[in-house]
Amino acid sequence: MAIKLLNIPMGQDAVYTGYTDQVPTWLKPYLAAALRSGMTAGLPSAETGIFGAEETITGAEAAVMLQNAMDLAITTVVSDAQTDVPAWAINAVTAMADNGIEISAGDSLTRGQVAMLLYQISTKTDSAPGLQMYQ
């Protein structure tokens, strides 16, 4: 959903996802676009090679992917003292908060939370520096 919302180009014939586990056919072009754009960089799944299409997404994972795509400004001093945020997601969660997008890093996101998150980022797409190359 974020790939479409952020207007990140995808190839309908793309099949390489970068992951070793089984990815549903309908998802492959979206996941390939996320990989190609750098959206999935820095996620623990990128290091394990397992995407886990049937797993829930956490707020930390969503924040990292959105920050990778949007490259939002961080105005707050980032602190490693945020114990509820994994170290690999601190910058991204901080960037989201600094831009008015609240994400609970440790929680698995519900459909309602994802819908709200997508709405919130839709209001930032015109000004997000990381998306300018797609506009």
Image (spheres, rainbow, N blue to C red):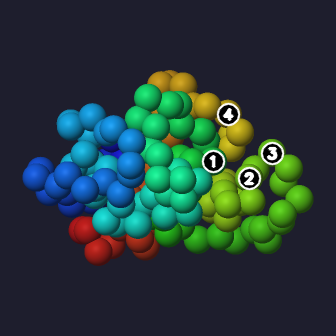
Residue 59's spot in the image, x, y percent? Answer: 61, 42
3D distance between C-alphas at marks 1 and 2: 7 Å
Residue 60 is labelled as: 1
The one of 120 and 1 positioned closer to us in this rendering: 1
Tell me the distance, in whole angstroms, between the alpha carbons under discs 4 and 2.
12 Å
The residue at 44%/44% (across/down) is 51
Which amino acid type corresponds to the residue marked 2 in the rendered image? Pro
Question: How crowded is the residue under tag 2: few (<14 C-alpha within 10 Å), some, or many (20+)?
Answer: some
Q: Residue at x 25, y 45 (%)?
A: 28
Mark 4 / mark 1, whichever is N-terminal? 1
State the mark number for residue 107: 4
Three-letter amino acid code at the position of disc 1: Ala
Q: Secondary structure at mark 2?
A: loop
Residue occupied by mark 3: 84
Q: For residue 10, which quarter of the picture?
A: bottom left
Q: CA distance from mark 4 to mark 1?
A: 8 Å
N-term mark: 3 or 1: 1
Q: CA distance from mark 3 to mark 2?
A: 7 Å
The residue that label 2 is drawn on is 86
Work out which residue is located at the far front of the displayed protein and give it. Answer: 20
Quick one: label 1, few (<14), some, or many (20+) residues within 10 Å? many
The reply to whether residue 101 is visible in this rendering is no
Name the residue rendered at 47%, 25% in the picture: 111
- The disc, 4 or 3, on the residue closer to the chain's N-terminal end is 3
Would residue 130 be visible to someone looking at this image?
yes
Q: Please report contact status of discs 1 and 2: CB closer than 8 Å, yes or no.
A: yes
